[in-house]
Image (cartoon, grey):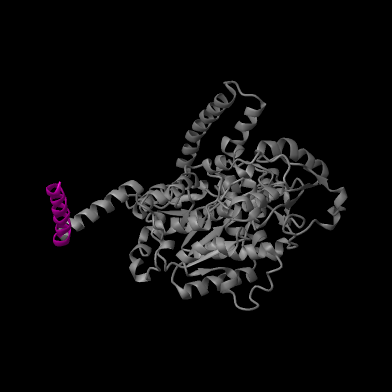
Amino acid sequence: MAQRSRRKSHARRLIASTFVFNPFILCGSTLFLLFLLSFIAGPLLVSPAQQQPVPIHQDAKDSLAKDIWASKLSQNYYGCSDPSPSFLGQVEYRSNGYLLVEASGGLNQQRTGIIDAVVVARILNATLVVPQLDHTSFWKDTSNFSDIFDEENFISTLKQFVPIVKELPISMQIHDEDKKSVPIPRKCTPDYYWKYVLPVLQKNRVILLKKFDYRLSNRLDEDLQKLRCKVNYHALQFTQAIKTMGTKLVERLRKRNGRYIALHLRFEPDMLAFTGCYYGGGAKEIKELTLLRKQWKNIPRRNPEKAWRNGRCPLTPEEVGLMLRALGYGSGTYLYVASGEIYGGESTLAPLRKMFPNFFTKDMLATQGDLHPFSAYSSRMAAIDFIVCDESDVFITNNNGNMARILAGRRRYFGHKRTIRPNAKKLKSLFLARQNMTWEAFRGKVNKYRKGFLGEPMDMRPGRGQFFENPSSCICEKATKNEDQTVNVTHDMKIGMDSQGQMHDEMIESHIKKHTGRKQPTDYDDKLHKHGADDMFDDEYTDIQNYPWLREK
């Protein structure tokens, strides 16, 4: 017994002496335990926001990379909005009457209405009276056309296409209640206007089109699409006062840093409430957003999971920041943010500010009194944001609203300036899984998902999406070294539209069969085909007047 006790005591002394006098074994055991722990727990993603502030020179390599600031192919394309000679020769100076239009919504929604009003006037061979702006909607903005846009430039730029007057001649003026109002369904074709609107115009000589937004088909013939571009990119210029203020802010940003990113951030409470998304705010968030949802009638039942799966949930400010850092924009990048009221206030913005300390808004850049002439008018303030965003080196948005679409198309037309439209459907699942991957792995996936969403030439098929975001009929390709003259790519785009049209029909047939079990179309299917499957499931297909979150702020 005593002998066994002596053996155990000797063994304990031998083990202790081994670890005391053999540090290699001790270190090896420690490393093995750490490896085993990391294998079980999995690697963690450490975002830039969680890291210590990174000196600008350390991430300058990323922020100076050429391809994230500009497209290498942009120099091969340019905007072209001059219609064919035959289109110009079709103008008949005997007008069928006067067209009055009330453009509804916020600044950019009104812009779409004004553009289409000019095209409809051309279709009807009518004289257009300078459009009236909505004074009764959500914003209660009393601005008139001439308070926001250069009226003289609008009239003179379009005089060879459509006759435009500031007001009805005295002989044609009538009381508001006596004006013949013609209701127009959404996204009507020229045939509809010829069949149902022209006879009313010829009979009454003056007609009024109310709530005029998205009342003209997205797909028109090439010359009418080019007229849309002529109005949008050349005729509709902001007033000198608005342009001067916007330019001042751009210059102040440029003086601080040579270039900057502009972010159009939509994260307002009513927008989040309507989408039905959930952002992890617990009972407080659910109660607040559910209360807001009660203002809408016949709204679908809230389904956060479905909204996330379908990519309907806007990226949070933090997610936008993570995406930008993953794409290679360093902490020293200057960021201009155009936004309305942010749900959660400064606490929601804090992670974005931490990732990009050089964070600016128009109020931060303006000196005392600069914005006073505009501050009481939401559309004029939005116009200033529009200018700063348009002039940015990179434009990014977390939404698919009117301003985002119009700026995306405008930046394509004027040189394909870098424009980032996040693929929310793919990115959301990535953000949910980000804690289970390394930063390098996360960054690699973000860069993989960015393809097709950076505003590169031809990254959207001709005819795809709203024309205002993808004005394919108005993008021309410059001549190559082996060609003698500039190549107009609209012919190829037409072919692409025909090809896409065939694909589009197949998609609709597939949709009908999937959801109804039928191959033959019904009235609903005809409506689906008439407007396009994308339109039926597009936010813009809903009546924007009834859904404030779709409005520009």
Instruction: Name the residue furthest bottom.
Output: 368
Q: Is residue 456 visible?
A: yes
Residue plotted at (87% across, 53% down): 175
Q: Position of residue 468 (x, y in %)?
A: 57, 49
Q: In this rendered view, identify the residue nearer to me: 376 or 90.
A: 376
Instruction: Name the residue furthest front.
Output: 1
Residue plotted at (56% across, 68% down): 361
Q: Position of residue 378 (x, y in %)?
A: 68, 63
Is 160 covered by the magenta stretch? Answer: no
Q: In this rendered view, identify the residue nearer to me: 298 or 281.
A: 281
Looking at the picture, does residue 251 appear above or below residue 25? below
Q: In this rendered view, identify the residue nearer to me: 203 or 312.
A: 312
Quarter that holds the C terminus = bottom right
Q: Position of residue 426 (x, y in %)?
A: 46, 44
Q: Is residue 417 visible?
A: no
Residue plotted at (47% across, 34% down): 499
Q: How many marks?
A: 0
Residue plotted at (19% across, 57% down): 26
Residue 537 lies in what quarter of the image? top right
Span colored in magenta? 1-22
Q: Main secondary structure of the magenta part?
A: helix
Q: Position of residue 393 (x, y in %)?
A: 46, 63
Looking at the picture, does residue 514 appear above or below residue 26? above
Q: In this rendered view, identify the residue nearer to me: 442 or 534.
A: 442
Residue 56 lies in what quarter of the image? bottom left
Is 9 covered by the magenta stretch? Answer: yes
